[in-house]
Image (spheres, helix red, strand yellow):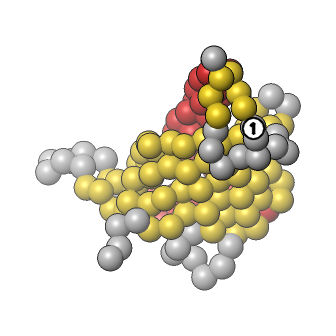
Amino acid sequence: MTVELLGTAQHTLRSREFAALYGRVQEFYAHQMQLLDTHDTGRWAHTFTEDAVLELPSLPGPVRARTGLARYVRAGAARQRTAGGRLSHWVGMLDARPQDDGSLRTRCSALVYAPPSEGGANVLYVCVMEDVLVEHRGDWRIAHRRVTRDDLS
């Protein structure tokens, strides 16, 4: 049995192959978000390619290259520690589309929330995260990430 993936130029994968690929991508995102949540900025930055681009709605322009990404996340972690809080990230509703060049285009929902306290968790942002993933020595790396807000009218 084969599964035809829409949006790709005649790219067909066997259902087992796609299930394995999808599982790897889910593991990648779970690991990456845990690195971000624990402020392991160096390891988090290494989930991107050297020349990666990160587009966030809160920034006036893209953050370019792995060193810029690490610097941006370190500054955010320092602000969180100073404010006495922390943020967590949840990724779901993942759509993964293999491309003919071997890359993978993904789109998912991402929630940014303050973990439970006395009153429970507080969702701060609802976003859509679109990535281009490339393989590097058997692991995924993000070449481009675009985050948009999905909670604004």
88 displayed left or right of 32: left
1 left or right, relative to 12 = left
Q: Residue at x 75, y 37 (%)?
A: 11
In depth, the one of 131 and 81 nearer the eye is 131
Q: Residue at x 44, y 42 (%)?
A: 92
Q: Quadrant of residue 74?
A: bottom right
Q: Secondary structure at mark 1?
A: loop
Q: Is residue 55 above or below residue 143?
A: below
Please provide percent x and percent y for residue 150. Answer: 40, 65
Can I make out residue 113 in this image? yes
Q: Nearer the viewer, residue 42 or 109?
A: 109
- Say which residue appears at 65% left-offset and 58% top-offset: 145
13 left or right, relative to 126 = right
Identify whether 84 is placed above or below 47: below
Residue 52 in percent (x, y) is at 77, 58
Is 128 situated above or below 43? below
**Amino acid bearing label 1:** His
Which of these two is toward me, 84 or 138? Answer: 138
Identify the residue shown where x is 81% and y is 43%: 100
Quarter of the image with the N terminus in it: top right
- Callout 1: 10 Å neighbours few (<14), some, many (20+)? some
Q: Position of residue 56 (x, y in %)?
A: 57, 69
In the image, 151 versus 120, the foreground residue is 151
Quick one: which residue is furthest to the left in this view? 119
The residue under label 1 is 11
